[in-house]
Image (cartoon, rainbow, N blue to C red):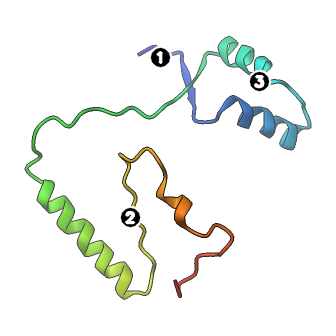
Amino acid sequence: MDEEIRWTHLTRQQIADLLLEEEEIRVSVTVIDQLLERHKFRRRQAFRSKATGNNPLRNEQFENINRLIDDYQKAGNPVMSIDPKKKKSSVNSIEMDTPITNNR
């Protein structure tokens, strides 16, 4: 890996929006591209790798997760389950205009 490269998780549009909001500087995403390249920034993207065999602690991991879920639910906290392998987000099924409270 090149030691000089710096990483950002922001999109070009997010960077342009932040510059306008925080510094009152209006720039296009094309200018953002040029600045990122000039200053050796790259966009960091999630990397997926294929599972390589069985982990001897796999069952222990799930038991710990289940214990944490039970603890949170007993304390009256909501628990969400997210499947990172699905292409479409299941959040779309939640009513987005309704705030999530401890009563839900």
Identify which residue, 50 or 21, lies in the foreground: 50
Write down the residue under mark 3. Answer: 29
Please tell me the numbered disc located at residue 3: 1
**For residue 37, what is the image quadrant?**
top right
Secondary structure beneath dot 3 equals helix
User: In the visual, does 49 lie left or right of 13?
Assistant: left
Please tell me the numbered disc located at residue 81: 2
C-alpha span from label 3 to label 1: 25 Å
| Mark nearer the N terminus (3 vs 1) | 1
Taking 17 as reference, is 98 above or below it?
below
The type of residue carrying mark 2 is Ser
| Mark nearer the N terminus (3 vs 2) | 3
The type of residue carrying mark 3 is Val
Identify which residue, 53 or 1, lies in the foreground: 53
- Where is residue 78? Give x, y as percent: 45, 77
User: In the visual, does 99 lie left or right of 35?
Assistant: left
Closer to viewer: mark 2 or mark 1: 2
Taking 5 as reference, is 21 above or below it?
below
C-alpha span from label 2 to label 1: 37 Å
Secondary structure beneath dot 1 equals loop
In the image, what residue occupies the spot 20% across and 37% down?
A: 51
C-alpha span from label 3 to label 2: 35 Å
CA neighbours of label 2 inside 10 A, class few (<14), some (14 to 19), many (20+): few
CA neighbours of label 1 inside 10 A, class few (<14), some (14 to 19), many (20+): few
